[in-house]
Amino acid sequence: MESPPAKPPLLNPPWLRVIVFVLLYLVINLLAYRLLDSGVSVFTTFANLIGKISGSPDTEFNFILLSLLASFILSVLLVILFTKMVDRRDISSLGFEYRGYLPDCIVGFMIPVIILGTASLILYFTKSLEWTDISFTSEDFLNGLFLMIVIAIGEEMVFRGYILNNLMQSLNRWLALAISAALFALMHSNNPNVDVVAMINLFAGGLLLGINYVFTRNLWFSIFLHTAWNFLQGPVLGFPVSGVNLPGILEHELKGNTLLTGGPFGLESSIITGILLILSILILYIAYRSRAERNAFPSV
């Protein structure tokens, strides 16, 4: 028995869906953060509950956790709503097919290890970074891992799974990638201690996160990269993650020019990281173009 024909999207062209989606995404997240910052007792209760679950006595950190969890839930719900009701497509169309993409997952995981590890070693050997102590608790480690997984899945569903996916349906794929990367950077422009270098690097990070999707329309590369990047940078190496301070295993002191160290925003605001990001994008582009010419990607 033949399946019924798919319904046409509620909004066309696809770039129009992206505009409406982004506007709603901004409004919903802004309202959520304003409500959480309003001091309403119910949110304090939720933050205290998260503190009991996470084992963290730090009220400010628990509110950060609550805010990020709220953003994750709202983002995922919005993506699901738009995909099902506006695009009228199945959720799997976002790029959740895992079979055949394990090598991409491994590459995605290793890239942050190489970039952040190299940047840290350069800072160490130039005496811009000094490791001072090691502080490990299972609570901080597991909280950090859970938080980074949540952030990665939520943001990848939004920026690659929905925004880049739709833009590629109506624009040149490289223009679509650039626009999605710019939106990714702009969405982080309100983070603490953000500066021009950080914005450039966030744009480059958006390109890096999306370049695999351009060829595969699969999310697992970017989810593994995004998770490993945030987790290694913050809960392991002890740097701020996009300006947000989290408990880290390694404690350090930074010295010298913040253009090199990244300062209070973290390694994402270092020109060293920026150079390594650009090199990584170029290498991946050459590698993926070669794979595409050989039809070596799993079928989309």
Image (spheres, rainbow, N blue to C red):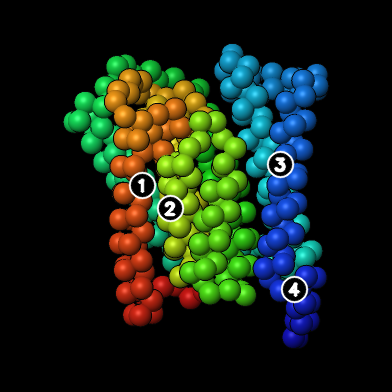
Q: Work out how far the residue at label 4 is from the one at label 1, CA to CA, in angstroms.
A: 36 Å
Q: Give the mark, 3 or 2, whose residue is nearer the N terminus.
A: 3
- Which one is nearer the viewer's eye here, 14 or 117? 14
The secondary element bearing badge 3 is classed as helix
The secondary element bearing badge 4 is classed as loop
Q: Is residue 218 visible?
A: no
Q: Give the mark, 2 or 4, whose residue is nearer the N terminus.
A: 4
- Image depth: mark 4 or mark 1 in front: 1
The label shown at residue 204 is: 2
Q: Is residue 12 visible?
A: yes
The label shown at residue 29 is: 3
Query: What residue is pinned by disc 1?
Result: 274
Q: Residues within 10 Å of mark 4 (few under 14, many from 20)?
A: few
The secondary element bearing badge 2 is classed as helix
Q: Would you say the residues marked 2 and 4 are in contact, meaning their CB atoms lie under 8 Å apart?
A: no
Amino acid type at circle 2 is Ala
Q: Position of residue 164 (x, y in %)?
A: 57, 63
Q: Position of residue 138 (x, y in %)?
A: 46, 23
The secondary element bearing badge 1 is classed as helix
Q: Would you say the residues marked 2 and 1 are in contact, meaning their CB atoms lie under 8 Å apart?
A: yes
- Image depth: mark 1 or mark 3 in front: 1
Q: Give the mark, 3 or 4, whose residue is nearer the N terminus.
A: 4
Q: Give the mark, 1 or 3, whose residue is nearer the N terminus.
A: 3
User: Residue 271 sits in which quadrant?
Assistant: top left
Which residue lies at the image location 35% right of the left edge and 35% below the top edge? 259
Quadrant where the N terminus lies? bottom right
Q: Work out how far the residue at label 2 is from the one at label 4, CA to CA, in angstroms.
A: 29 Å
Q: Would you say the residues marked 1 and 3 are in contact, meaning their CB atoms lie under 8 Å apart?
A: no
Query: What residue is pinned by disc 4?
Result: 12
Amino acid type at circle 4 is Asn
